[in-house]
Image: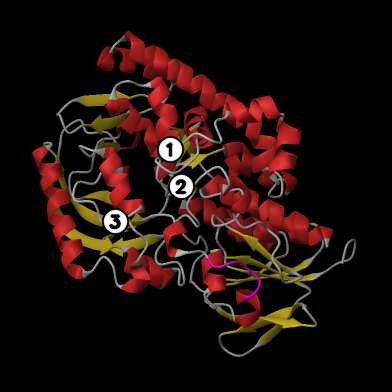
Amino acid sequence: MRGRQQRVGVIGAGIGGLVAAILLARQGHQVVLCEAAPAPGGKLRRINLGTTTIEVGPAALTLKRVFEQIFAEAGQRLSDHLKLTPRTQPVRHIFADGSVLDLPMAAEAAEAAIGHFAGPAEARGYRAFRARAQAAFETLEEPLLRRARPSALSLASQAGVGRLLATGPFTTLWEALGEHFRDPRLRQVFARSAGYVGSSPLQAPATLMLVAEVEHAGSWWVEGGLTRLALALARLAIESGVDLRLDTPVAEVLASGGRVSGLRLAGGAVLACDAVVANADPAALAAGRLGPAAARAVEVVPVMKRSFSALLWAIAGRLDAPGLPSETVLHSADAAAEYTTLAYRGRLPGDPSITLLAPDRIEGATPPGGAERLLVMVHAPARGDAGQPDAVAVARAEAAVFARLAAAGIALTPDAQQCIGPAQFEALFPGTGGALYGPAVQGWQATFSRPSSRTKLAGLYLAGGGTHPGAGVAMAALSGRLAAAEVAGG
């Protein structure tokens, strides 16, 4: 199909699907983008809560240049579509012993704060960690993040064997952090890099420290929330010639002669296609959610290799905690036990780490006089398709989480509240068990085992956080770029 105009069907208007559709349309292909939901965005969602709305997806934007490039290729500027504010406010970390660390975003300020918190040796450890994380990102950005999924041999050839080994592919993130921090509290703080992609630092390779570098290199709040990014990309897609159809679920990927032939919509209509990009978790395809041809085109993701899900409480209410920043983390007393319970035992930990987001306090904004918008989150195993955790376990977890917040001096009085857990995420993203980040990052081979853009079925391609190069908003955009390149290449 190389070199000629194709009819391309894109399933799902998440970030990966939107980017793939935009790039393919601008190359002259006829693109139809079908989205089951009434709005674009995928996991970038907002819900109604009482008299307000609240975003329940990712909170901040990283790797801004990925999106600046996409808009530039369409002859536009990202800054003309979105108002972005750099994150400067520290993240508050509260530990089981009652100690508190307000960790700034800027490296020099963070080093000083760590030194004051835990001493000069730990500040030097942080400096060495930052240098290692930065080197890992610089080594892997081009040959890994921006190219089709490499083999171990090709990655070593492109990155250099010495530089690749320096990223710690055969060492776990937990072990590598122990080389830099003797204080277990700081080990916990930076182990969150694995949690950002729904994985355990006890299993993830040390290369995942590049996630910390991505965040520290620049993170931005989007005025109105990250759903505005999805809306901006949707407008760009329409302006680029994409036929965007919302409220249009796809029932099946059709194939003929060993190749994609079209899409059958839930209403029965058939769209003839030369190629299809599925912006969906590969586990959903493997579970047959897009028909037998698509199911045979991907590998099944074992339950033990699913990334984490979450218990998420969206709240409109009153927060009695003067001076609390927009992000606060209450750490477990035993991080290793927490991750072991989640990843190995598949159960909710009794003492989870808790993240509290208060978006109305971004960059020191004064909270409203009435109800604030709040999000409280803990990791949960992705067992939503098995009915786990059940209602009793969720209620027990809710009581424990809110008691921990109160004990830390953070008193919440909800006016309206909604809990979203693995079962609800499974209903939204069927076939995943509620996993939010695709396959978990486990072991040194994770880089080479994550699904790539190409599948076993000719003409069927994948995009989204469940595919290479990984989870996260910017990574999903890069996956859309990779998928578009594969389609265009035939």
The answer to whether marks 1 and 3 mark residues whose Cβ atoms lie closer than 8 Å is no
Q: Which is nearer the N-term, disc 2 or disc 3?
A: 2
The quadrant where residue 105 appears: top left
Q: Position of residue 3 (x, y in %)?
A: 90, 61
- Seen from the viewer's position, the closer of residues 255 and 34 is 255
Q: Which mark is residue 346?
A: none
Quarter holding residue 398:
bottom left
Image point 53% across, 44% down: which residue?
82
Element type at mark 2? loop
Q: Is residue 423 visible?
A: yes
Say which label, 1 or 3, has the lower sequence index.
1
Q: Is residue 360 above or below residue 243?
A: above
How busy is the neighbourhood of tag 1: few (under 14 within 10 Å), some, or many (20 plus)?
many
Residue 193: mark = 1
Contact (CB < 8 A) between labels 2 and 3? no
Q: Which residue is under mark 3?
A: 312
Instruction: Measure the C-alpha gap from mark 2 to mark 1.
Output: 7 Å
The answer to whether residue 355 is visible is: no
Magenta-tinted stretch: 296-300
